[in-house]
Amino acid sequence: MRSIWRTLDRSDLTGIATICLAVVAIGVSYGASAVTAGMPAWLPILLSVLVLAGGSEFLFVGIVAAGGGLVAAVLAGLVVNARHLPYGLAVPDVVGTGWRRLLGTHVMNDESVALALAESDRDRRRAAFWLCGLGVLLAWPLGALLGVLVGTAVPDPDRFGLDAVFPAVLLALALPALRADRATRRAALVGAGIAAATTPFLGAGLPVLLALPAALLAFGWGGKAAEPA
């Protein structure tokens, strides 16, 4: 842990702390929503520890609260979590081996992977990934617990705008990459367009999965077009 503090600078630590605060905030919304939907208090807390994936957990709670079956809710969560497959391929050098790989796979999330990919140095990638991943591991269950505690007092937590915290954080993380080159911007625009166009027709999480291969194809095409003849 001491090596992590030495590897990252103040701006990195501030960014990770901000992300963890955002995770707590959205966790409050998640825990409160689950309780107000009639679920037992222990369920969102247990899911926040074992699953540790906000998107799939929100989808699970939403499907069950709407009267959907447990099998359908679990399958939908697995589909949303399929995005972790390319995550693992993108950061194999920072996860580690042995028991570290098991823990690293568990703390692999949107934020930790985004921060790792934003670093060019391997040691900094590893430090950013682990510090952010472990921070989320603590922050998400804490937020869920706080949400459960205040769920009865706040019947509609979304009216406070807590559900907008995560998208805002992810957008802030993505903006530096969009300035990098034309191919990256093209891939992002293609993926965003496909996700936006299919959102009215597909369930939560599916538009993003559909946009991913198209964005990768656009990125590959842009990269080839930029190569000198």
Image (cartoon, grey):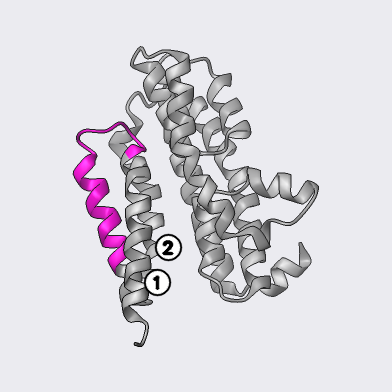
Residue underneath mark 1:
176
Q: Where residue 125 sits: x, y (%)?
A: 62, 67
- Please tell me how crowded label 1 is: few (under 14), some (14-19), or many (20+) other residues with Cα within 10 Å: few
The residue type indicated by label 1 comes to: Pro
Q: Residue at x 71, y 45 (%)?
A: 103
Q: Magenta stretch containing residue 203, yes or no?
A: yes
Which residue type carries mark 2?
Answer: Leu
Is residue 94 a member of the stretch shown in magenta? no
Residue at coordinates 53% horizontally, 38% vertically from top-left? 143
Q: Quadrant of the N terminus?
A: bottom right
Which structural element holds mark 1? helix
Residue 215: tell me if it is visible.
yes
Circles 1 and 2: CB distance less than 8 Å?
yes
Q: In the rendered view, would you say 74 is above or below 204? A: above
Q: Quadrant where the C terminus lies?
A: bottom left
Question: Residue 47, how many percent across, how many down?
Answer: 57, 28
The residue beneath circle 2 is: 173
Using the image as rendered, state which of residue 176 and residue 202 is in the foreground: 202
How far across and down, in percent of the image, does residue 120 sit? 57, 76
Bin the neighbour count of mark 2 within 10 Å (Cα to Cα): few under 14, some 14-19, many 20 and up.
some
